[in-house]
Amino acid sequence: MFRFIQQQQDLPEVLSLMEQYPVYGLDTEFIKVDTLWPKLGVFQINIAEQVFLLDGTTLDLTEFWDKIFQAKLNVFHACGEDIDLIYHYAQKKHLDNVFDTQIGLSFLGQGLQISYQNALKQFLDIDIDKDQTRSDWLARPLTEQQLSYAANDVRYLMQLADKIKQDLLSKHLYECALQDSQHLTREIGIETPLKALYLDVGNYRHSRRQLMQLQQLSVWREQMVKALNQPRSFILKNATMLDLVEKNPRNQFQLSQVKDIRPNIIREHGKTILDLLKFLPDPDDWPLRMARPIRHSSQDVGHKVNLLLQQVGEETSVPKEVLLRKKWLNAVYQHVVFHGDEQDLPDYLLGWRYEVLTQPLIEILHADENYLLTQMKVAD
């Protein structure tokens, strides 16, 4: 049914099979409770319907990572965390040869987050248990239940992928789903510049001074979590950072009143945090205020956008939630208002969506530019 590979001397057999059949079904089991980086427990691979479980605690997988990057196609279901793990262990990025069956299913009207278990039941009438999801995958020996669970995660994956591919081909959507899978893997590989990390924490309500404080806190936190290999929430939660800049504590006692701040953080880093809040660069170097969220354009143009989405959805058979996400729409709004470069738009908008959706959307929004400027006014 499957083989659990724990000895380095047994790995070449797997690598040889990968060379012969360069299309793989893949999944990972890992622990990421008290660390920033995941700890690999088991890497599952289906090669030509042969299932192998690779022991992430004992094997040197350097050649294995190379084979994945050289593959004709890597098939996953909900690949986000798997790709992040691969990038960390392989120490390289841009795995473009990926098909994510969850993304494929979204094009077939199954929503954005259908589980592997539900997909197998719905498309192949196969039932699998998911009772080992929270297992300790670093413990040795692994139980038979754990090993069987891990094997099932790839045992039927290629059958599912084949079924989804055929359904997508019948709708002329396979290449679109393949592109979106590749866009996701590239997105995962993009590391936000240190000085831009605050943008994921702050919002348009914060003053430029508060954004400068958030920027300094975000840079410090990122440096700390990478040095200590701890989750960001172990240093400062986002909500804690927001409370810090809004309360602006001046001493250790006031600092202790901040939301969800850990006593050990106050004890070990309290002075540093207070200094980051107090000592700021020259105001000319503070970030600009953030744009207000764009919820609606003027009524007429908002109606035209909805009509465009409806029309493109009917023409392409792509569900509306797959066609355009809120953050992509905001990116187009900002592109129009600030006259940005189209190459800076999300990759999703520059692929198969470009001619059918992105270009018409930009033209519609250009007609409403004055209204958008009032909605996205950046204050000093």
Image (tube, grey):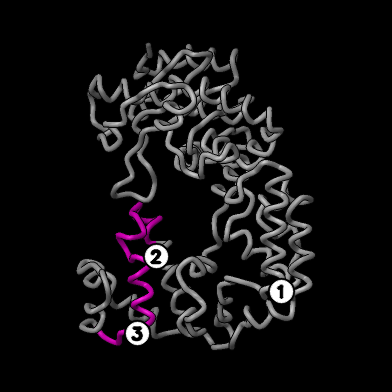
Left or right of 46 on screen, residue 171: right
Q: Is residue 60 visible?
A: no
For residue 40, what is the image quadrant?
Answer: top left
- The circle on residue 248 is 3
Please state the extent of the stretch shown in magenta in the rendering.
224-251
Residue at 34% in and 65% down: 237
Residue that label 2 marks: 221
Name the kind of residue labelled 1 in the image. Answer: Val
Left or right of residue 113: residue 95: right
- Front tag of 3 and 1: 1
Q: Position of residue 248 (x, y in %)?
A: 35, 84
Q: How far apart are the two marked residues, 3 and 1, measured between alpha carbons?
A: 33 Å
Residue 121 shown in magenta: no
What amino acid does circle 3 point to?
Asn
Q: Is residue 233 above or below residue 73?
A: below
- Which residue is disc 1 drawn over? 337
Q: Secondary structure at mark 2?
A: helix
